[in-house]
């Protein structure tokens, strides 16, 4: 199951560094939604620092892994199955969406609309997306590793998308990410009424980190 593979491969990321990056844009009393929380690593980090956070994901097994992770750390947070292509049923102060979640959507305006409508007055949307340079940098990339398990991860470019193929125990998993120019995201955010849009250097130099405020 790919969720188990993803969970193990995400284990070596410095989540404290990501929390430190987010901290200037979060108030202590904010309610934070981790959109595409996966197996809960970032959510755990936010909760460890006594922030009020909850998570959504469209993969039930990811949510089960997140639940187990929080339970092991003696932490609690609401976790919900939700597809970002559907309207958010809640209002929060901050939506965070990291680890290139937004690159998995071919078109993003509907997603951004739902996120905007799910934010309170003065709400903030904080997310990362790959820079267009990865289209060349990742084309033909192959990673053949034995740790934390034996796997091969290969990437091929097709126009403005990256097609990933992951082979584990003869099982093949395929993923596609869509890479857009920065102007694409900024123009949609502006059209939806986000007034303050910042693009910052963040923990991963291959990515744009975008903070959009209402």
Image: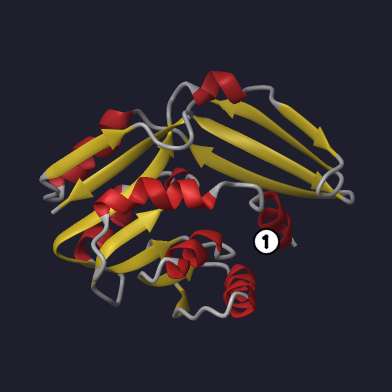
Q: Judge left or right: residue 207 versus residue 189.
A: right
Looking at the image, residue 42 lies above or below residue 13: below
Looking at the image, residue 69 lies above or below residue 161: below
Q: Residue 117: where, in percent of width, then height? A: 20, 65
Q: Judge left or right: residue 189 versus residue 146.
A: left
Which residue bears the numbered disc 1? Answer: 3
Residue shown at 28%/76% (left/top)?
Answer: 90
**What SS does tag 1 mark?**
helix
Residue shown at 15%/50% (left/top)?
Answer: 192
Residue shown at 33%/55% (left/top)?
Answer: 111
> Is residue 98 visible to us here?
no
Question: Which quarter shows the C terminus?
Answer: bottom left
Q: Quadrant of residue 97?
A: bottom left
| Closer-to-camera residue (116/72) | 72
Residue shown at 52%/24% (left/top)?
Answer: 135
Q: Quadrant of residue 64?
A: bottom right
Q: Residue 149: where, in percent of width, then height? A: 84, 49
Question: Which quarter shows the N terminus?
Answer: bottom right
> Is residue 66 visible to us here?
yes
Q: Quadrant of residue 145?
A: top right
| Closer-to-camera residue (158/75) | 75
Q: Residue 5: where, in percent of width, then height? A: 73, 55
Q: Judge left or right: residue 34 versus residue 26.
A: right
| Closer-to-camera residue (11/156) | 11
């Amino acid at each position: 199951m790919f969720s188990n593979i993803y969970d193990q491969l995400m284990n070596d990321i410095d989540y404290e560094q990501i929390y430190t990056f987010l901290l200037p844009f979060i108030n202590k009393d904010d309610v934070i939604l981790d959109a595409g929380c996966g197996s809960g690593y970032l959510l755990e980090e936010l909760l460890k620092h006594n922030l009020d956070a909850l998570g959504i994901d469209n993969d039930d097994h990811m949510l089960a892994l997140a639940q187990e992770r929080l339970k092991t750390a003696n932490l609690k947070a609401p976790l919900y199955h939700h597809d970002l292509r559907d309207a958010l049923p809640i209002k929060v102060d901050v939506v965070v969406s990291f680890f290139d979640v937004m690159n998995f959507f071919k078109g993003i305006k509907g997603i951004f609309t739902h996120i905007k409508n799910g934010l309170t007055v003065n709400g903030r949307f904080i997310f990362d997306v790959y820079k267009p340079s990865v289209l060349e940098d990742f084309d033909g990339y192959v990673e053949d590793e034995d740790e934390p398990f034996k796997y091969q991860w290969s990437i091929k470019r097709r126009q403005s998308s990256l097609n990933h193929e992951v082979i584990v125990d003869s099982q093949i998993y395929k993923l596609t990410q869509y890479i857009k120019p920065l102007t694409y995201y900024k123009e949609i955010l502006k059209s939806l009424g986000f007034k303050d849009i910042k693009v910052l250097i963040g923990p991963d130099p291959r990515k744009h980190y975008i903070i959009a405020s209402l």
